[in-house]
Image: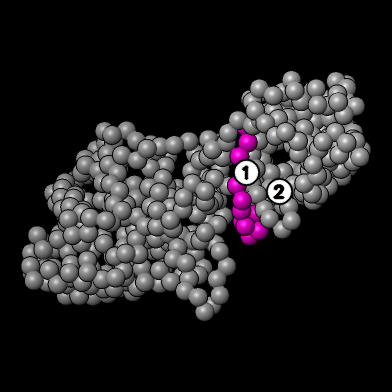
């Protein structure tokens, strides 16, 4: 059973996967294989409905999605003679295999969902064998071809939707049975097909145990909603793709405030003060200059999240050509502030900026000093003014920060509890 985790985390994981799949590639380089999932099922098990919901979920996150047409619905197969049943079945297999091979080298799609793909033929081969349409030898050759080809490694997910025959018949005919059942939509054929699907799944598990196979029972008696079925499939596909693309926590974290929050650690206290101390005064008081640099911060807000919600601040920092994703929680004077900073590439910084909502830009010239384990920065913040920040070395050093501030000529009235972002947003809202 797939563990269901809150949707925002899964959306963040999907964005990280999208960023990996959407990386620009030269024509001389092999394409990055898109997510490939085959979705099969018993008649009226809800396959088409769930495919539509899964497709919509990925499309909302900007994935280019292709859902291939079921082979039985194509003009060339529908119009094909059925005088030779085995040839007719092989035609289905050839269509599905062609779609799979094309998907594996696609540069146009992030996801390809096959509505009944090549592995679906395993159940139909078995069904025809039991019906006396195919010989044992015919079925053996076809199955060997399907299961021993290199295309088996292309799958990120193989989904089977099954249900009991009674559910299929109810969804097809309603509460009252018809006077005449269809050739496939009848209790006997549905029971046989369900058994063939279950046997083909077991055959897959034995022959190729590493295949990512998910089985979902959609019987009315189970009581699952379409949304629950969709979530289970989405989470299974994402987990499989994450494993194939070898994405670790550091790859996922920049896209997820939840993951960043879990990684964040308690910060040593700091105090922010209005104004600057003269360079000469700092040197005379034993502060050692470490250097000066420019910091450019782009503040972001994930979709459906208000800026600074829960005193949380997410931003990308560019400094001397290096980029970082930073998450902070808590105000300046809070004793329980947390922070996490992860180095990222320029390309990832650009992807994050285009994926999240940009709420502000803050640039500052920062000059850094140290003394006895304390850090002091003199900040000239564009549009806000001049400030001094003093950071402690231990969690219990807040009182000492006030003493240091006073030794440099600051008073308690100079303490500013608000972050630069809060000050900027407050100033913008008052204009």
Rendered image: mark on residue 290: none
Q: In the image, 189: left or right of 281?
A: left
| Residues in magenta, as a range | 338-350
Q: Is residue 419 visible?
A: no
The x and y percentages for residue 204 are 21, 57
Question: Which of the pair 40/345 is nearer the observer?
Answer: 345
Which residue is rendered at x = 74% and y = 56% of the image? 320
Q: CA distance from mark 1 to mark 2?
A: 9 Å
Q: Find out whether residue 345 is within the magenta segment.
A: yes
Which residue is rendered at x = 29% and y = 70% of the image? 150
Where disc 1 sits, the SS reads: strand
Q: Residue tagged by mark 1?
A: 341
Q: Residue tagged by mark 2?
A: 317
What sort of colour scheme is used for the picture?
A: one colour
Q: Is there CB contact under 8 Å for labels 1 and 2?
A: yes
The x and y percentages for residue 231 are 42, 42
The x and y percentages for residue 148 are 22, 69
Question: Which of the pair 365/28 is nearer the observer?
Answer: 365
| Farthest bottom residue in view | 28
Q: Of callouts 1 and 2, which one flags the residue occurring earlier in the amino acid sequence?
A: 2
Q: In the image, 204: left or right of 377?
A: left
Q: Quadrant of the C terminus?
A: top right
Question: Which of the pair 101/88 is nearer the observer?
Answer: 101
Question: Which of the pair 108/409 is nearer the observer?
Answer: 409
Q: Find out whether residue 93 is within the magenta segment.
A: no
Residue 81 position (above or below residue 396): below
Residue 284 position (above or below residue 116): above
């Amino acid at each position: 059973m797939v563990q269901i985790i809150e949707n925002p985390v899964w959306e963040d994981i999907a964005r990280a996967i999208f960023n990996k799949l959407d990386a620009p590639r030269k024509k001389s380089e092999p394409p990055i294989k898109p997510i490939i999932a085959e979705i099969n099922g018993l008649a009226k098990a809800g396959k088409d409905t769930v495919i539509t919901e899964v497709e919509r979920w990925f499309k909302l996150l900007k994935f280019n999605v292709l859902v291939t047409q079921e082979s039985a619905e194509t003009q060339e197969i529908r119009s094909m003679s059925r005088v030779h049943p085995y040839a007719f079945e092989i035609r289905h297999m050839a269509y599905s295999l062609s779609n799979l091979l094309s998907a594996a080298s696609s540069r146009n799609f992030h996801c390809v969902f096959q509505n009944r793909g090549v592995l679906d033929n395993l159940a139909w081969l078995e069904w025809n064998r039991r019906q006396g349409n195919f010989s044992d030898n015919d079925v053996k050759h076809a199955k060997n071809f399907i299961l021993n080809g290199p295309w088996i490694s292309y799958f990120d997910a193989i989904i089977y939707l099954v249900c009991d025959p009674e559910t299929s018949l109810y969804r097809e005919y309603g509460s009252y049975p018809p006077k005449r059942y269809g050739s496939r939509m009848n209790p006997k054929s549905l029971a046989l097909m369900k058994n063939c699907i279950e046997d083909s799944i077991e055959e897959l598990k034995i022959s190729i145990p590493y295949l990512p196979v998910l089985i979902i029972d959609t019987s009315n008696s189970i009581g699952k909603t379409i949304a629950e079925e969709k979530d289970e499939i989405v989470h299974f596909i994402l987990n499989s793709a994450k494993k194939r693309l070898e994405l670790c926590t550091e790859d996922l974290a920049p896209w997820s405030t939840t993951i960043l929050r879990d990684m964040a650690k308690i910060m040593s206290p700091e105090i922010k003060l209005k104004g600057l101390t003269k360079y000469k005064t700092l040197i005379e008081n034993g502060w050692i200059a470490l250097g000066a640099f420019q910091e450019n911060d782009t503040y972001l807000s994930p979709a459906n999240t208000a800026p600074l919600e829960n005193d949380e601040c997410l931003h990308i920092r560019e400094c001397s050509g290096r980029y970082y994703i930073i998450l902070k929680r808590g105000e300046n004077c809070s004793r329980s502030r947390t922070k996490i900073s992860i180095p990222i590439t320029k390309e990832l910084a650009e992807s994050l900026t285009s994926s999240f909502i940009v709420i502000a830009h803050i640039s500052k010239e920062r000059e850094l000093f140290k003394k006895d384990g304390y850090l002091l920065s003199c900040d000239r913040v564009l549009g806000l003014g001049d400030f001094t920040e003093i950071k402690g070395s231990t969690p219990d050093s807040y009182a000492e920060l006030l003493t240091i501030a006073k030794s440099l000529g600051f008073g308690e009235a100079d303490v500013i509890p608000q972050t630069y972002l809060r000050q900027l947003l407050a100033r913008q809202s008052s204009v």
